Image (cartoon, rainbow, N blue to C red):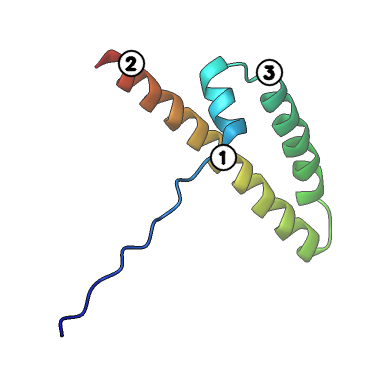
Amino acid sequence: MPKTERKVAIPEARYPEIMRLLETENFEKFNRDFMTTYQELEKVSKMKGLKKAAEARKGMKAIERTMDLMRELLRKKYEAAKR
């Protein structure tokens, strides 16, 4: 008797807040919150105490990557709109 393969449904990823940001392109609060957090992390990253400074630098890198991702998503949105 042949084995039957069961297909598992993969749920679609949904990120309503990010979708809303991309649709409205209203990044004021997003930018303000990220910049405030980044500035605080920057202060901590310059403090003595290697663990806190290292963790702050990781947080700063995460914010930078998130901002890069948002720029890339906007670029993709504009590319799709041109088609």
Q: Residues within 10 Å of mark 1 (few under 14, many from 20)?
A: few
When asked about the image quadrant of residue 63, the answer is top right
Front tag of 3 and 2? 2
Which residue is identified by label 1? Answer: 66
Is residue 39 visible in this depiction of the protein? yes
Label 1 amino acid? Thr
Lateral position of residue 5 relative to residue 30, left or right:
left
CA–CA distance in space, label 1 to label 2: 23 Å
Disc 1 secondary structure class: helix
Q: What residue does disc 2 label? A: 81
Residue 23 at what x, y percent from top left?
Answer: 52, 19
**Residue drawn at (48%, 28%) of the image:** 71
| Disc number for residue 78 | none
Q: Nearer the viewer, residue 69 or 42?
A: 69
- Would you name the residue on which mark 3 appears? 28
Kind of residue sitting beneath label 3: Glu
